[in-house]
Amino acid sequence: MAEEERAVERAYVEEREGRQVLVLRWNTGKTSAGRLFGRYGEGGRPDFFRLLFGALAGSLRERLGPRGEEVFNRIRDSAEFRKTSKEIFEDMKSWFFSEIAPKYGLDKGDIFMVITEIEVDLTSGALRWNRERTEFYYWVRSDRCQQLAGADVGERMRQLEEENRKLREENERLRGEVERLRKELADIKERLAGLIRP
């Protein structure tokens, strides 16, 4: 649904050592790696910057009123903002492709959403990505569900067959042990009977 896919901005401004910092809870909305990080975004450019800048501009307007647009324009044109926004892009892209995609077995075109926290120094324009406050959600395609289910069933059958084989072996071992103990008991009874006879 369009409402679900729209990036949601939740932000607040706090004072830190005499500086104002905007803390933005940024939601990318439903996207794909090609759209967010690659040339399949709007206009053949990564959607990352458009989504982040839009969320930032909207949050500043919401928090600072008419002054928010002026603050955003000043921040956007600063060297620190350009430098740190590119660093966050590269860090998040690296995190996605080296950690997240392999962990969840994601393919090109798979749909996901990142919800994270970005801090913006309203004086210098520097951005900081709070990686520890990052959540990742993805949608599994139905064809992959079927493949996974098939793989899971096959694997579970192999596990059950192995458990069954081990149980049969253990059963045979215990049967042999019981037979040995019966013979020992019969032998002990026979000896005791010989001792008791007058």
Image (spheres, helix red, strand yellow):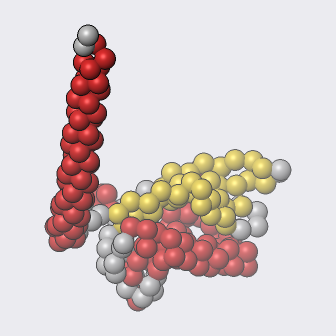
Work out whether residue 24 can be spotted. no
Q: Quadrant of residue 103?
A: bottom left
Work out whether residue 130 can be spotted. yes
Residue depicted at 18% across the width and 65% down the height: 154
How far across and how far down the image is residue 124, in percent?
A: 76, 67
Q: In this view, does 147 lie above or below 22?
A: below
Q: Which of 33 and 167 is in front in this view?
A: 167
Q: Which residue lies furthest to the front in this view?
A: 198
Q: Is residue 41 above or below residue 190?
A: below
Residue depicted at 62% across the width and 64% down the height: 129
How far across and how far down the image is residue 37, in percent?
A: 47, 80
How far across and how far down the image is residue 178, in percent?
A: 24, 37
Q: In which quarter of the image is residue 56?
A: bottom right
Q: How many tags in the picture?
A: 0
Q: In this view, does 101 lie to the left or right of 178?
A: right
- In the picture, which quadrant includes the N terminus? bottom left
Q: Residue furthest right?
A: 17
- In the picture, which quadrant includes the C terminus? top left
Q: Nearer the viewer, residue 62 or 191?
A: 191
Q: Which of 45 and 111 is in front in this view?
A: 111
Q: Quadrant of residue 108?
A: bottom left
How far across and how far down the image is residue 13, in percent?
A: 65, 49
Q: Nearer the viewer, residue 59 or 99?
A: 99
Residue depicted at 78% across the width and 54% down the height: 19
Residue depicted at 51% across the width and 76% down the height: 98
Q: In this view, does 7 lie above or below 190?
A: below
